[in-house]
Image (cartoon, rainbow, N blue to C red):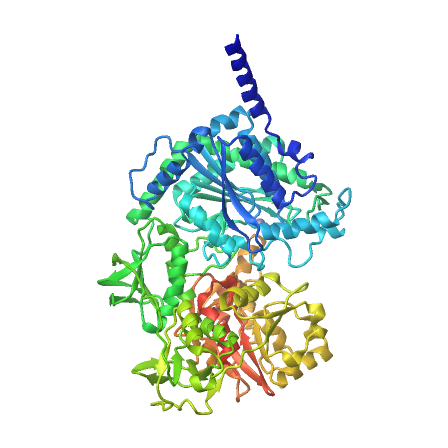
Amino acid sequence: MKNILTLALAICLFTTSWAQIKSPEEYLGRKIGTKITPHWKVLEYYKYVAEQVPQQVKYQQYGESVEGRPMYVFFVSSSKNIVRLEAIRKNNLQLAGEETGNAELVDMPAIVWMSNNVHGNETSSMESSMMTLYQLVNPNNTATKAQLENTLIIIDPCLNPDGTERYNNWQNGIIGVTYNPDLYAREHSEPWPGGRVNHYYFDLNRDWAWQTQSESQQRIKIYNEWLPHIHIDFHEMGINAPYYFPPAAEPLHEVITPWQREFQGTIGKHNAKYFDQQGWLYFTKERFDLFYPSYGDTYPIYSGSIGMTYEKAGNSSAGLGVYTDQKDTLTLVDRAIQHHASGMNLVEVVSQNASKVVEEFKKFYKQANDGTLASYQSYVIKHEPANEAKIRSLMELLDKNKIRYYTAQGAFKGIEYATKKSTTYNAKDKDLVVPGNQPKAALVRVLFEPEAKLVDSLTYDITGWSLPYVYGLPAIASSTKVGATIPYKLDKVSNTIGDSFGYAIKWDGFASAKTLAALLQKKITVKRSEHAFKLNGEDFPSGSLLIMSSNNKSVNIKKSLKEIADQHAVKVHTISSGIIEGAKDFGSADVKTIKAPKVLMLAGEGMRALNVGEVWHYFDKDLQYPIVLVNPKEMERIDWSEIDAFIMPSSTYTFLRDKTQAESFANWIRKGGKVIALESSVSQLSAQPWIKLKPMKQDTTLRAKENPLKPYAERERESLKEYTAGAIYKVDFDATHPLMYGAKEYYTLRTNGTLYQYFKDGAGWNVGYIKENALMSGFVGQNLSKQIKNGLVFGTESLGAGSIVYLADNVLFRNFWDSGKLIMANALFQVD
Ligand SMILES: [Zn+2]
């Protein structure tokens, strides 16, 4: 009797413990979508569920946002899988060839990774993910119970906690008892900079491959430790759109395998069936292509996953409910329900195909490792002492992406990036090789091949990013396999700094600029040599730094120099005399002291957040040099007499339209101010009467030749003739000009066709220009292509005692255009 009672009690306890899991509605006391749930509360619910069913849910904190919010992944599966989580992970890496060992296919679950809220103001996915989590472990849901036997779900509730909370706090702070659906109500007009972006106003869904942002770095580290088979990235688009799910639109990169295409189709059809039953509208095969490698769909695809974007109407202006053009009310409740449905449908279809999914994942990596996915066999970066800083920087990127590289050996044939001509080459000491056959082969191919083939040119993003161009490094794409067995290493830089007349640092990369920025902040007097010189048998290029002991008596330069130079892997050379062979002596007037400039930028309502963010992040995290950010409406309060440099990222500068304000701005320049203008701000400046720079005249003859009877249905394709989403051009430049110090070759990302006329009669300096046939990589419409030639990209102009530096292309594009970082530093520190 007693035993029966105990058993009954045990059953009772067991079943009640199951039954005790509260749905998110029960836990929050309201329906999902009727309010916006704060990030911490969402995590609280996730952890609550994990505590209720620890046998089915485990979690791991993988990082922290810039503003200090925790970032987690939650593992959800059957108890059988959860107990052997680490074994599954290891087995999966073995399947990929990332780890050695005998990988098992039997009993290997399909791994699905769900990413939510990468754009913080696309609210519905983090909300819906709570419903998905609940349904996966709901004891009454027999379907998911069976599905989790062969699938492991990894949920990241929120990829962008800072942006999410920026949006959520604002929404929750202004909403009354009920929402107002009128689009003109303030709850539909999000203030600057908006929650889409992270702390530094970066779009994290453009940052997967580059990982300039700490959220991306931390997340992709754990992502690559798992390599899921399926990745779903939830988004929202404009309020009047329906719903988007795969298959994706063309162009698809050629490396995407038939299976990856096919299974996207299978997933899409499965989802469509459910959406049809519900009467929900959707579209597929449009708008969202698979080409640029830094998205939440493409990066996973190039890492062997089925990577997918799902989009529901919503976004910034949607709030809790909003009237759409169709005279309908789009509510957060409905947005969450649809994303939840897609998530559940995905788990279902993956579970139905689990063994095939795992098998195909293994096949992908087999092809990656045996070279089938490669277009070129190897990519070789040529080492030169002057390139070493850039190579170090490239190595960091490769490491972040788990791309393998070695010391290149032997002779080989290939295409030279700089000339696009074939060449034979014998590997030299410290040349670096990236083999085309390795686990990350697809990503290697996409990131390195000189020119990706576009099957269709209507793309959502830039079309050129080949790394040797981005880093400005001489390289060869080899059609034969290059010897790659010896690990690649560059010597650690550790300076020994004794007493000396002075010290010299070569100006040959961004690391030199970072060193200068740090020295200036230590109040160390640094000079620069306008002329190249020789010291102890070594060549020092123009712009090299000189730190003279006699100028720095009050500071401990030896200690600071060692610390700073070691940190940036920069070598400090000893100067024993002031006499220089072949150039001006160190006491000459041409050897100028570098002033630590006080830098200012406008940042606030009216400015383009992404462009402001690129400059802000560059100063704060890359260069690590102070910049004063001023709200545009506070501009009148600036004490301009204190400001040395004003950075103008691409934005609309309304003060330039006001004659009085524009004139007082010009007067500040005349008194010695420096302006560094980027992209569209260059064209706004060129419209000022006191500016000599003028844009090139558009060649209208090209348009006149067009067929006046062109068909209406061809209008989209016709419009492409005038278009580029972003392509790479070679920049020819005056290497003696301070703006290009340290740059051996430079390639620019052109995202529009605007070029400027060459300065004549000494009106300014033509520093960087595009000549004929300079297109290196990417798509440019045929009409536009004919116009992008013989014009200025980089230049400088003097105004009174001051100067303006023109950078018509964005040298800080998404902060991954590595070679551009030195150009910005030159503009700041080297250009007078
Ligand atoms: Zn989005």
Residue placed most toward the observer, 129 or 789: 129
78 left or right of 650 in image: left
Residue placed most toward the observer, 374 or 325: 374
On screen, residue 233 above or below 492:
above
Residue extending farthest top: 1
The answer to whether any part of residue 184 appears in the image is: no
Q: Residue at x 76, y 51 (%)?
A: 185
272 left or right of 665 in image: left
Residue extending farthest left: 410
**How far from the left and from the top, in percent, is residue 27?**
64, 33
Q: Residue at x 52, y 10 (%)?
A: 2
| Number of numbered discs overlaid on the protein picture | 0
Residue placed most toward the observer, 273 or 216: 216
**How far from the left and from the top, in percent, is residue 252?**
45, 49
Residue placed most toward the observer, 282 or 134: 134
**How far from the left and from the top, in percent, is residue 373?**
34, 49
The answer to whether any part of residue 314 appears in the image is: yes
Q: Residue at x 64, y 40 (%)?
A: 335
238 left or right of 352 in image: right
Which image quadrant for residue 226?
top left
On screen, residue 417 above or below 35:
below
**How far from the left and from the top, in percent, is residue 449?**
37, 58
On screen, residue 386 above or below 814:
below
